[in-house]
Image: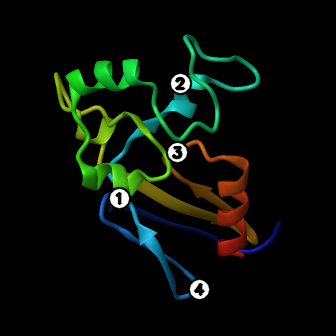
Amino acid sequence: ISGGIDYIHTYVRMPGLNVTSNGEYLGTLCKAAMGESFAAGTIDGPGMFDFTQGTTTLKPFWNFIVDFLHKSTPEERACQHPKAILLPTGNLDIPYPWAPDVLPLQILKIGQFVILSVPSEFTTMSGRRLREHIQ
């Protein structure tokens, strides 16, 4: 590795942010929400109850329970579609906000080696897309 060292750091308000790739509009980011796949766990450790990966609809029992915390609006459901909202964390603030709207992003460069620091755990495909876009 040879070359200089540089970085950039900023804070970004995520909900409402327009997403583009190569000048093409792809959509607008929503407030944070967790779907049923979140509760289903992973291959390494499945979740509890009857949640399953890849489900796009919630079972009536969980709709009933979640509605005590926050009843999702048609706009929220449309923004998250096709993911069914299990926990609308971006809209929950009792006793404090469950998910931030403003998140830090940074890029570190050491010679030709670049590190992207993002406030999320990416899926394999998301990581590939990010790497492809940055290159």
Image depth: mark 3 or mark 4 in front: 4
Q: Which residue is mark 3?
A: 120
Q: Please tell me whether residue 2 is drawn above or below residue 38 in the rendered image.
A: below
In the picture of the structure, the residue carrying the numbered disc 4 is 22
- In the drawing, what numbered circle is on residue 14? 1
Which is more toward the observer, 63 or 80? 63
In the rendered image, which quarter is residue 5 located in?
Answer: bottom right
Q: Amino acid at mark 3?
A: Ser
Q: Earlier in the sequence, mark 3 or mark 2?
A: 2
Cα distance between the residues tagged 2 and 1 = 23 Å
How many numbered tags mark residues here?
4
Mark 2–mark 4 Cα distance, whole angstroms, equals 34 Å
Give the amino acid at mark 2: Ala
Q: Which label's residue is closer to the chain start, 2 or 1?
A: 1
Q: Is residue 134 left or right of residue 68?
A: right
Other-residue count near label 1 (Cα within 10 Å), few / some / many at <14 / 14–19 / ≥20: some
Q: Could you tell which of marks 4 and 1 lies nearer the N-terminus?
A: 1
Q: Measuring from the top left, give residue 69's x and y in whole percent.
A: 22, 25
Query: Which SS class for mark 3?
Result: loop
Image point 21% across, 21% down: which residue? 68
2 vs 1, front mark: 2
Left or right: where 24 falls relative to 98 = right
Give the mark, 1 or 3, whose residue is nearer the N terminus.
Answer: 1
Contact between labelled residues 1 and 2, with CB atoms less than 8 Å apart: no
Q: What's under tag 1, amino acid-wise?
A: Met
- Identify the image quadrant of the N terminus: bottom right
Q: In the structure shown, which secondary structural element does the residue marked by tag 1 occupy?
A: loop
